[in-house]
């Protein structure tokens, strides 16, 4: 497999240089998640349009990308902008990615039901084409595609909770679980742009509780803690699960505590393997329950004695929430193509949020 055609979006190197007059340039960010997709359009100083839609789960494998293209086009038309005039498009997508240069596709287990025989998804997709359809529709735009956790890491490093950290990670806890990694101020990409799929790493499950992940693993972190897995195990959505947990329901407590153990183990592994200084956590599931989840994770890591052997490596480390949950995903997509000389305008918008989070 070849790396994605992304121009190597690194923490300090935007991939896109503004074309023509900056005040007239418009860029787009697309966030493709496990349940929703969102599009934002931005000018030099601000987001000028936002639209979102559910991610199709049935039909042809092209259904997802066709919906993305339609959402971008609708967003442009709502402002009287021709879609063909977009200067650049950043695509933050759930992965992992497959395919050679020019044919990048997503093989996300939360979208592709063909990856495992017992998938509950209403399709038998093996991969979702991303790059070729987008390049065919938006021929003059610079298109940059990256894993959603990697792009969110760029946003948090430039504007949010990871600002000032040279060695950090972003963990998204949502429908699935993914990680973006930065060492020495450099985004870690990996051989095919897939570095950070730590949600599919293995941890010690509680007793015999080893559910099947959409990727095919039994008992990986995502199968124990991902939103889709928790909702399936509970038989309702995760909001209902956490409501039951807060009421003291025994079965809900077992699921949530197991999920916390798995994510805590993952955070520990990241700290001691990569010698990180800070990990920021975001994602829909986490942000909706952060008042409960963040203190619980900190207790496990730093107070419980769960990891007695490597406390020296945890000294001075921090686990924080993202700076602004409502912006992380869209800013991640935009950061893939945000021109260098636009960044001062955006930095001013985020400084207060960053300070309040780091002080927490």
Image (cartoon, grey):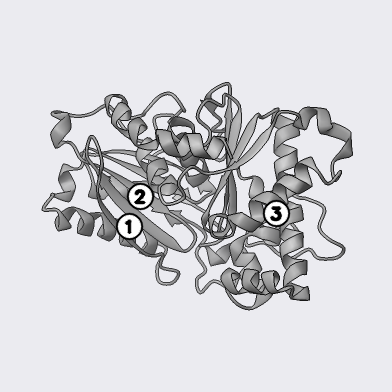
| Picture quadrant of residue 249 | bottom right
297 in relation to 62, above or below: above
- Contact, mark 1 vs mark 2 (Cβ under 8 Å): yes
- Contact, mark 3 vs mark 1 (Cβ under 8 Å): no
Residue 30's disc is 2
Secondary structure beneath dot 1 equals: helix
Looking at the image, is mark 1 or mark 2 nearer the viewer? 2
Residue at the image point whose x is 11% and y is 53% from the top: 80
- Mark 2 crowd level (few <14, some 14–19, many ≥20, 10 Å Cα): many
Residue 305 relative to residue 80: left or right: right
166 in relation to 80, above or below: above
Looking at the image, is mark 3 or mark 1 nearer the viewer? 3
Separation of disc 1 and disc 2 at Cα? 8 Å
Residue 114 visible in the shown view: yes
Secondary structure beneath dot 3 equals: helix
Residue at the image point whose x is 57% and y is 24% from the top: 166
Which residue reaches farthest left?
80
Residue at the image point whose x is 51% and y is 74% from the top: 122
Q: Is tag 1's residue or tag 2's residue first in the polypeptide sequence?
A: 2
Residue 119, percent across and down? 61, 70
Residue 101, percent across and down? 42, 38
Residue 68's disc is 1
Separation of disc 3 and disc 1 at Cα? 29 Å
Q: Quadrant of the C terminus?
A: top right
Secondary structure beneath dot 2 equals: strand
Q: Is tag 3's residue or tag 1's residue first in the polypeptide sequence?
A: 1
Separation of disc 2 and disc 3 at Cα? 26 Å
Residue matched to label 3:
221
Residue at the image point whose x is 61% and y is 56% from the top: 291
């Amino acid at each position: 497999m070849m790396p994605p055609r992304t121009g190597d979006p690194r923490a300090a190197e935007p991939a896109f240089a503004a074309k023509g007059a900056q005040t007239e340039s418009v860029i787009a960010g697309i966030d493709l998640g496990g349940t929703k997709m969102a599009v934002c359009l931005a000018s030099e100083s601000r987001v000028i349009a936002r639209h979102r839609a559910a991610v199709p789960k049935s039909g042809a494998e092209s259904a997802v990308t066709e919906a993305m293209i339609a959402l971008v086009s609708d967003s442009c038309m709502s402002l009287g902008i021709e879609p063909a005039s977009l200067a650049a498009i950043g695509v933050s997508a759930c992965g992992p990615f497959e395919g050679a240069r020019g044919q990048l596709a997503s093989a996300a287990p939360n979208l592709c039901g063909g990856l495992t025989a017992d998938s509950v998804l209403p399709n038998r997709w093996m991969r979702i084409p991303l790059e070729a359809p987008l390049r065919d529709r938006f021929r003059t735009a610079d298109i940059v595609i990256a894993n959603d956790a990697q792009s969110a890491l760029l946003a948090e490093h430039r504007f949010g909770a990871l600002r000032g950290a040279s060695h950090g990670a972003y963990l998204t806890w949502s429908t699935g679980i993914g990680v973006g990694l930065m060492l020495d101020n450099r985004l870690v990409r990996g051989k095919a742009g897939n570095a950070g799929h730590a949600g599919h790493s293995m941890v010690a499950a509680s007793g015999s509780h080893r559910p099947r992940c959409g990727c095919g693993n039994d008992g990986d972190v995502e199968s124990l803690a991902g939103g889709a897995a928790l909702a399936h195990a509970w038989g309702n959505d995760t909001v209902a699960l956490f409501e039951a947990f807060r009421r003291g329901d025994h079965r809900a407590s077992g699921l949530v505590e197991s999920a916390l153990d798995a994510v805590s183990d993952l955070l520990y592994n990241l700290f001691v393997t990569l010698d990180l200084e800070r990990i920021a956590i975001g994602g829909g599931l986490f942000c909706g329950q952060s008042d409960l989840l963040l203190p619980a994770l900190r207790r496990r890591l730093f107070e419980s004695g769960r990891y007695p052997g490597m406390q020296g490596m945890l000294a001075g480390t921090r686990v924080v929430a993202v700076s602004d949950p409502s912006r992380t995903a869209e800013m991640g997509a935009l950061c893939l193509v945000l021109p260098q000389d636009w960044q001062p305008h955006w930095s001013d918008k985020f400084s207060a949020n960053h300070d309040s989070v780091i002080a927490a």
